[in-house]
Image (spheres, helix red, strand yellow):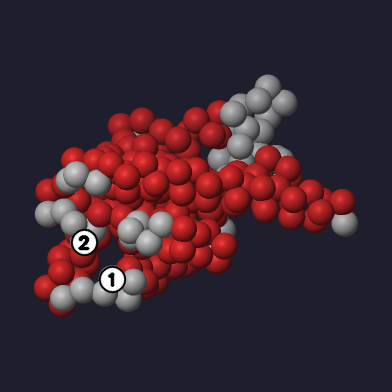
Amino acid sequence: VWLVGRCVSGWHAGIFDASNTMSVHIVSAAGALAATSITGPRLGKYYHTGESIALPGHNLPLTGLGLLLVWAGWMAFVTTSLDMEPIKLVRSVLNLQVAAGGGAIAALVLTKSRFGKLDATLVFNGVVAGLVAGGPLCHRIPLLPALSIGILSGILVLRLSLWLDAHHVDDPAGIVATMGGAGIIGIVLASLFDLITGNPEHSLWRLILAIMAAAIGFSCAWIAALFARRR
């Protein structure tokens, strides 16, 4: 994380990585993917036929409490990285709240329509997905696009979680889908925004640095997981 953060700030000073999407979220998702690829799924996660078995968390209220703490802490995490006028900080916080709500609503509607009941953990992941995807542009867009980003991220996270599960990638906390999928949305949309506003160089560098962040996170976690497994 430190290495990628230094590269983002040092190699190309014109790129502003709001909410540290590249240096935190993309790296953590790539690292989680590498680690789960090495360690494999949990015992009892899949039938011998390959069908997935739901392994619910042991304490859903504590999970909800953890989400609230993350949600509140996210505001401080992002706003302290934004050196700008108070009115723009307020807009950034509002955009993040709207994006998180959009992600939650999208995940809620999709889980209800697909499973016939609500899945609280996927709704929680929808909230985090909205926060992650909305971070890179939270200080640059109005409320309606922020809501659209949140809804898009909530849909993608659910689809990606189910796809990973179907391919035996056991990701209990949803780090790969939530941080990775939503982080990619945020980076791609920020790059498109740079392109539209006349900064094609920033757009290209943002994508290059995101790919580099994923490669570093995956490689480091792969090596660490291999070493831990041998021990």
Residue 219 picture location, percent across and down: 66, 48
**Which amino acid type corresponds to the residue marked 2 in the rendered image?**
His
Q: Quadrant of the N terminus?
A: bottom right
Q: Is residue 149 visible?
A: no
- Bin the neighbour count of mark 2 within 10 Å (Cα to Cα): few under 14, some 14-19, many 20 and up: many
Residue behind mark 2: 139
Residue 216 picture location, percent across and down: 60, 50
Residue placed most toward the observer, 67 or 82:
82
Q: CA distance from mark 2 to mark 1?
A: 8 Å
Q: Is residue 181 visible?
A: yes
Residue 196's place in the image compared with 227, above or below, is: above
Horizontal side of residue 35 vs 179, given as left or right:
right
Residue placed most toward the observer, 137 or 96:
137
Residue behind mark 1: 82
In contact (CB < 8 Å): disc 2 and disc 1:
yes
- Which residue is drawn at the image coordinates 72% and 26% (left, top)? 48
Residue 214 picture location, percent across and down: 54, 46
**Which amino acid type corresponds to the residue marked 1 in the rendered image?**
Leu
Query: How many numbered circles does the render carry?
Result: 2
Label 2, secondary structure: give it: loop
- Bin the neighbour count of mark 1 within 10 Å (Cα to Cα): few under 14, some 14-19, many 20 and up: some
Residue lying farthest to the top in this orientation: 49
For residue 229, which numbered disc appears in the image? none
Choose the circle earlier in sequence order: 2 or 1: 1
Q: Quadrant of the C terminus?
A: bottom right
Instruction: Report which quarter residue 69 is drawn in.
Output: bottom left
- Which residue is drawn at the image coordinates 21% and 61% (left, top)? 139
Instruction: Report which quarter residue 132 is drawn in.
Output: bottom left
Label 1, secondary structure: give it: loop
Residue 66 picture location, percent across and down: 44, 67
- Which residue is drawn at the image coordinates 19% and 51% (left, top)? 146
